[in-house]
Image (cartoon, rainbow, N blue to C red):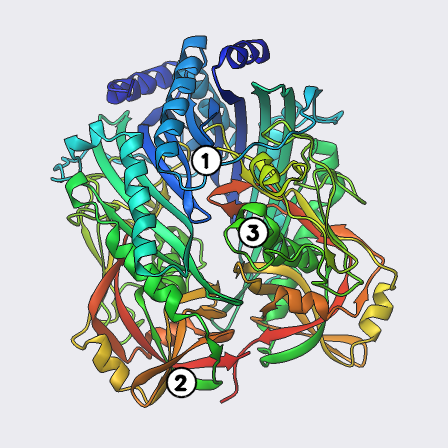
Amino acid sequence: MPETDLLERCRNAVELARAHGADRVEAFAQSLETVNSTIEKHDLQISKSQLEASIGIRAFVGHRVGFASTNDLTQVDAACRDAIGLAKASPEDPHNVLPDQEAVAPVDGLFDPAAETFEAADAVRRTAKMLALAEDIDRRVIVNDGWFDAGIRHVAVANSHGLAVEERGSLFTYGALATARDGDLVSNFDFQFGATRCVAEIDVERPIRRVCESALASLGASRGKSFKGTVLLAPTAVSDILIGTLLFQLNARNELRGRTRWKDVGQSIAVPSIDLVDDGRLPGGVATASFDREGVPHRETPLIENGVLASFMHNAYTAHATGIGNTAHAAGTSRSIPAIGPTNLTLRPGETTVEEITADIHEGLLVRRFSGNADPISGDFSGSAKAAHLIEGGKLTHAVSGTLIAGNVFDALKGISGLSREVERVFNLTLPYVRLEGISVTAN
Amino acid sequence: MRTLLEGIASAASSWVELRYHARRSKRLVVRNGQVEESSSVELIGVGVRAFVDGTFGFASTTDLSQAGIEKAVQVARTSAEAASAAKKKRIERLADARLATGSYPLQTADPLEGHSLEEKLALVIDTDAMVRARSDLIVSSEVSYAEMVDEKVIVTSDGASVETTDAKPALRVLAIAEQSGDQTRGLETLGITGGWTEFLGTRSPEDLVERAVQLAVDQLRAPHATGGAAHVALDPQLVGVLSHEAIGHTVEADFVMGGAITADKIGERIASELVTMCDSGASEHLPHAVGELPIDDEGVPCERTVIIDRGVLRSYLHNRETAGHYGVAPTGNARAYTYADEPLIRMTNTYVEPGETEVGELIDGIQDGYYLRGFGPSGQADSNAEFMFGVREARRVRNGKVGELMRGVTISGNAFEVLHSVDAVANDFRWEYAAGYCGKGQAAKVDDGGPHIRCRLTIGGEQNA
């Protein structure tokens, strides 16, 4: 049976920890009810079901804090004692605080009642359809891995400041990792993904079609060219190369730790065409929820506006430490203390189409995926361009393999010379194609 | 618990595997003198795998009563039946195996649980302070300790019945240096299988700090490398990472059946005859490797598997399903991360056997190349064995002399071409003693290692236009 009294359990845990000597307490509980079905080796592999409820307790003794979590709900008392023990062993930190209660407006469309009757056999049927689609498209494609997940997640947070919120959401995610094989030719892996909150909106065809096209396009790739110049990143490659460093730099905790290059709101960090917005209430977003890990209501936060740093992402700790307002970016589950993380991030698209951007490139490289290092501190990135195509005279000429690209994210942000009108959702990111200049391209 | 699971398994109407898994983890994180995390996580449950009509179904539960586990068995069976109807190629059989019975406790006189949280926190706080005291150029430090203590009971309806205990502590030291707005990082890690004495005895916190700080500071002054083909010496850690990431994953039999580059290559020469590569649940050559595991999650003993024997591909890594397909014995590589995960083919400790060359002699043989040490911060390898790894420390070598540090170096190539190019294997050996995890849908604690080797591969750096 799914846990229906999660909020009550949180309230009880808060009382219990206070009775054991905690000055302030937060309890976060979640229950997960999932069915899934997976593809391996181009065949249906296994069907799985899971039901788990767990609770995480943050206990404060003065400004010392400890955290304990258990998925055995008969052991909440022991977890409270553990959290208090851990708090007592830790030094004081004046910024260990809990957020106050704020009104939370529910987000519509998070939960589809049809999810309650979605069974393992339904997940199996969707997975079988993904395989059948791939075979219809081209028999040289091998779906190495794929999955269909259906889940209902119920979360609740209560704290000793009177905050008490809960929410239930359904989420269907599906994706495939595929290669193509033709004789001795093996293509690179490509990966595509889809997600929705509603049973009626499940669309496995789009990711399958795209993953097949991309795998087939990198079959028979040949050696590329070495040059320093233009690289056009597809949304997944934008995510692989730029987003990790952006998120590291925009994390207020990293800024407090002295680890970020970006220090001040108002500083210019990118070309003026760059706008980056985080919105925890984005309709249909994978990360959409009405409140964060600490129970603070989600909102829209511009992070970069016209190339200028507009805000860092904050949770209660960093908001207190910096004296700046909380942006509701506490992230995590019942198994960990609240960290800082994005919700749904959107990089504002440009005016030109991918075709127009490509037509304007005399010599360049289109990169669909990137496999390598992107160091968030130095900004240096280097690695393999995957599913890459040479652009010559404004046209995609041929697929290349074994090509390395290298550059620096901070320099790249100031040298962005194009953003496409088209956008794609990559998990919680909505991204256009991004044209960069001055990137080192080395053919192996 | 073992008696309860044996009773349920013996009453099951088809093959089942029942796995009770209790994990108790602790994690302590200190940054710049402040405790950022002190947490304790308990994760307990039973995972059930049912095999019906050539198909697996899986269910997990946190209800540890007989009724709760029996219900999970029923859900797993129903899932298997649903999947079976859609499966194109049903599993012919599960390979017979010498299934383990009995008790396999972790061998240590000094269990982690015997040391207080205060003592562990003091270690982390002191180590973090050491990082910042070591150099004025260090602007930030981060030290974390994580331990994972596992208890398992694995029972199958065809005869496995084992209890195991395991403990894996890890320490991670990060130093960030800064000069004129330029930041660099040095990371050193230690992870083992064992108790507290073995943990601190394998490598001291002082040594981790010394190397992390040195690396961060030296990189501030280091130039970027020039890209191109190079003659290089790889240290044991990079040899291990190459073995695990670029070769190991391509010989996991589930990947092989999915079309990895090693398909149909058993018996073929795929590397220099100087190269012998193995995967073993035991800590060969040196004790306490992180991937140490006596029995896998199908109840099969984890033995030493020779993957490449003097350059010739000899074996894939198997679970009972793939071993049944290939008509060989399972190699004990079926592993599940938590009770809620089904066992997958995973490596344990993957390594290259030592050779005969002295390390000094191996480096002497490089006229113009690099000495490459350690993996990081990240990397990836594909099913066609193409890889790209970041290198933690890359130094120029000229006329056999190790010289200046280079920055932001990556290595890439095709792992089998690299193994063909090996022209010397040293007679030393070291485990990585990795603190991280291998990811394959699920996490797994693994280790890798080997001797120094000399080979040719591509160095990535800045292209001079």
| Amino acid at pointer 2 | Gly
How far separated are the C-alphas under marks 2 and 3? Answer: 38 Å
Mark 2 and mark 1: span between their CA atoms?
Answer: 51 Å
Secondary structure at badge 3 equals: helix
Q: Are marks 3 and 1 on the same chain?
A: no
Q: Residue at x 75, y 68 (%)?
A: B422
Where residue B374 appears, as percent x and y from the top left, is 65, 60
Task: Say which element carries label 2.
Answer: strand
Q: Is A282 on the left-hand or right-hand side of A90?
A: left
Query: What type is the residue that disc 3 sits on?
Result: Val
Residue carrying label 2: A229
Q: Which residue is labeled 1 in the image? A: A92
Badge 2 and badge 1 both on one subunit: yes
Tell me the mark number nearer the camera, choosing from 2 and 1. 2
Identify residue type, mark 1.
Glu
The residue indicated by pointer 3 is B256
Q: Which of the image's four quarters has the N terminus of chain A?
A: top left
Q: Residue at x 82, y 75 (%)?
A: B365
Residue B240 at x, y = what percent?
68, 55
Please name whichever residue, B347 or B233, is drawn nearer the observer in this view of the structure. B347
Q: Position of residue A281 (x, y in %)?
A: 17, 46
Please say whether residue A376 is visible from this viewpoint: no
Question: Which mark identifies residue A136?
Answer: none
- Tell me where residue B119 appears, x and y as whole percent: 63, 31
Side of A361 where B39 appears, left or right: right
